[in-house]
Amino acid sequence: MKGNRISRFGLFGAGILVLPFLWSFSTFFEHLERDNYNFSPPNDTTDTLIFPLTNPNQTGGLYLNQPNNFSWDSEFDEESGQYIIYERIGGLLAKPPMFMTPEEYQDYIFAKQAAEYWNEKTGRTGGKEKPEETEENKGFIPQFQVGSEGFGRIFGSNIVEIRPQGTAELSFGIRRQKIDNPIIPERNRKVTNFDFQQRIQMNVVGKIGEKLELQTNYDTDATFAFENRMKLEFSGEEDDIIKKLEMGNVSLPVNSSLITGAQSLFGIKGQFQFGKTMVTTVFSEQRSQSKSIDIQGGGATQQFEIWGDEYEANRHFFLGHYFRDNYERFLRNMPVITSPVQITRIEVFVTNRKSAALDVRNIVAFSDLGEAEDKAYRNSARNLPGEDIFTGFTGAGNTAAATFPNNNVNKLNPQELVQILPGVRNMADVNATLVNAGFVEATEFVELANARKLAPNEYTFHPQLGYISLNQALNQDEVVAVAFQYTANGRTFQVGEFSNDGVTPPRNLVLKMLRSTILDVKIPMWDLMMKNVYSLNAFQVNQEDFRLDILYMNDETGVPIPFLPDGNLRDQLLVRVMDLDRVNNNLDPIPDGFFDFVPNITINPQNGRIFFPVLEPFGSNLARKLTEERARDRYVFQELYDSTKFRAREQTQLNKFLMRGEYKSASGSEISLNAFNIPKGSVSVTAGGQTLSENVDYTVDYSLG
């Protein structure tokens, strides 16, 4: 407290010393300003009167402001023949009266009027006239005026005004986190990193004259890029040919049922008038899509179109090659699934991108775990030191252990593996241990520290067909590994280790690897990713009025057709060739030419996903049914399954299959538009041919769609 008193006293003392300094500094600028105007008062007496401390021309700044009750006047004394100058504050004299001869007074008035004239011209704003400042135009950057007559004719005024509003924040820091969790290794419990945050929310409104206006909105926290808007608008007068020019975010609404307008455009828009003719032109990039939804009986009917190369990647995986190899056989008698397997329990681990601290474990995942054959490479004839010890079929004969995938099908059994290679349980030693034993990293195994176990609501699995579906797609370098348990022919089998199987943290769990950190289409693990699943981008799909056709883009006519132009399949609908038409509406084994809407087999109505009952519908499935080699070369799109989607799309001569149809969502008073952040005013609703009024007949949630 004592230090604070000293600081305040020092500041008060400094203020007392500053006042005489400002007084002398003000006098210096008075002389400087007088010299700039080349004023030459007659003598020292008038020098004080021309620029006194309380001169009416002084308006603050370095000078002291005039009090409101200050007055300055003069009178002529006939007896002495001199002018008397009075300066009063209220009714009291501020200083003794000053006397001037008529010649001195004449020179003084001339100098005073000249000073007022030049002050009015310069406005003390760098040679430009200062516009009158009010509470409305007062801001951080003041108005200024351009001294050009041509500028005023073009823009309607010489005044330029820029008004920025918003905030800009920058924060720097260091974050040190310590987690006393026994599951996490000791060296990973303390984490130190830099914390740099920036946040900018800026809204700039600028006006050049009366015709040109600039509007800019920028927010670093914006969810989508289109929320940051910029628009430059030039508005002409009544007699101008150019009525309006807009640059930036523009729109083109058209009040016509034949030609529809567009919203969320970015480009240039112009409106011109030639006599009585109005012309509107737009040169822009469209950043939105137009959709039409038909509502019948409370349900929304929408059309869709999906190309064959748009399967959902990195989301759906078979739990093993046993399920992939028997997938088509299990669905041969659809809608009856002839699978002896019933999965009862499953745990899924993925790369911990969210830095979660709960439900994390150290894992080591093997591609051959639970496999009756060496599945690390397509060609199993390789010479690796550990092949005959840790991978490959162990000769269990015709027992159930050799028929179904389980931990005992080869010597990757976790209990047996740990006895031979104890370092498998230690995260610090597992990589060196397995590499020295002959395993290939990222192909035969992968170790992952702090892998996150997915919650049951983050994925789904089919208990009979043996595949999982993730709610979110994985990145290219993310790992997915599983442990599952199932029953078959009255016996229980297990692949991998569960988190409560007695392996305490931080020791590693041994799991089945479904996806590695590398993307290699040459290894059989690439086949575990399902490539026969397509999304309709819809929810709660209704079986009523559902239609799906598979079409082929005919090069000769340029029109998609529901069959192949030539070959032995030219008389069959493609929806039947792809085994999506096996039964009729009563589920009798009689094809009827329509898509088989079988829930949880060919379609998932909850999330609108189509599942083909064949593994490679446009590849090996089509090749088996075509009898001519020439037709196989022309139609079979095997590259879609043997390479990545990006490489497959380069085969434009084969990428000609598409799915087209319509679906009807569930009925209700709320209608989903299947879109987010819709531009305001872009939704138009009609009923019975009559256009409804927004906020009267209906309301729109533009954010949630």
Image: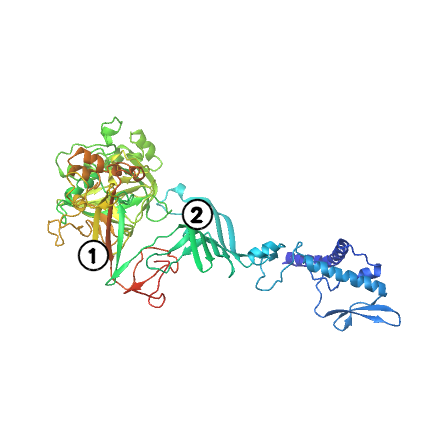
Depicted 109 relative to depicted 374: above or below: below
Q: Residue furthest right?
A: 79
Of circles 2 and 1, which is in front?
A: 1
Local packing at callout 2 (Cα closer than 10 Å; few below 14, some 14-19, many 20+) is: few
Q: Which mark is residue 177?
A: 2
| Relative depth, front residue between 669 and 475 | 669
Could you tell me which quadrant the N terminus lies in? bottom right
Which mark, by number, is residue 356? Answer: none
Q: Classify residue 295 by image quadrant.
A: bottom left
Where is residue 178? Give x, y as percent. Answer: 42, 47
Q: Which residue matches tag 1? A: 545
Q: What residue appears at the point 24 percent right and 27 percent down from the top-left corner?
A: 382
Name the amino acid, label 1: Asp
Q: Residue furthest bottom?
A: 91
Between residues 476 and 48, which one lies in front from this camera angle? 48
Of the numbered discs 2 and 1, the one sitting upstream in the chain is 2
Work out how far the residue at label 2 is from the one at label 1, CA to CA, in angstroms: 56 Å
Horizontal side of 85 relative to 546 (left or right) equals right
The crowd level at tag 1 (other Cα within 10 Å; few <14, some 14-19, many 20+) is few
Give x and y (percent) for residue 473: 31, 46
Q: Is residue 466 above or below residue 31?
A: above
